[in-house]
Image (cartoon, rainbow, N blue to C red):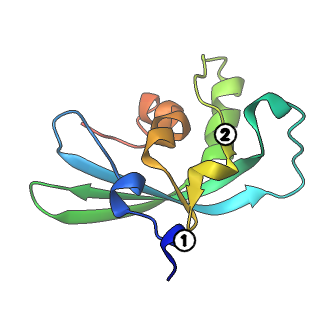
Amino acid sequence: MSYDRFVDERVLTSRDALNRFQIKIKLIEIDEGARDFSRRFGNRVLVKKILLTIKHTETQEVEERELNVEEVEKRMKKERLFSSTNRWVASTDIKNGYVVASKHLDLLADAIALDIVPLG
């Protein structure tokens, strides 16, 4: 593998403040037909489904869970709850099919708020 295609694992892994969990997000499905008319943010893709891998650092237990981000967003709109997430992810924030750690909270905020993804 060439140096320019190498991606450090630490770039793809996020942690909670107490380092109890390590999280990785792999894109499963994106909306190919979605058009991003806001060129202000660069080239972005619309995320539909992700594979969330949670590693519990104390027990070394690994949990994988598929999350339909589109459905979570629809639920937030239907229940008229405030939403802080944005399913648009810049293509530069995707490395080897994984979302970089700095964008994890953007994709997971609503799911955490609704206890769909319990982290605590």
- Sequence order check, earlier mark of 2 and 1: 1
Q: Callout 1: helix, strand or loop? A: helix
Q: Quadrant of the C terminus?
A: top left
Q: Where is residue 3? Give x, y as percent.
A: 48, 73
In space, the residues marked 2 and 1 are separated at their CA atoms by: 25 Å
Most distant residue in the bottom direction: 1
Q: Where is residue 13? Give x, y as percent.
A: 36, 53
How many residues crowd mark 1 within 10 Å: few (<14), some (14–19), many (20+)? few
Q: Nearer the viewer, residue 74 or 108?
A: 108
Most distant residue in the left direction: 58
Q: Residue at x 84, y 33 (%)?
A: 39
Q: Amino acid at mark 1?
A: Arg
Q: Where is residue 53? Give x, y as percent.
A: 38, 60
Q: Residue at x 26, y 65 (%)?
A: 62
Q: Residue at x 74, y 33 (%)?
A: 41
Q: Residue at x 50, y 83 (%)?
A: 1
How many residues crowd mark 2 within 10 Å: few (<14), some (14–19), many (20+)? some
Task: Tell me the quarter of the picture where residue 5 sits.
Answer: bottom right
* Label drawn at residue 103: none
**Residue wearing tag 1:** 5
Q: Nearer the viewer, mark 2 or mark 1?
A: 1
* Direction from residue 34 to residue 115 in the image, left or right: left
Q: Nearer the viewer, residue 86 or 82?
A: 86
**Residue wearing tag 2:** 87
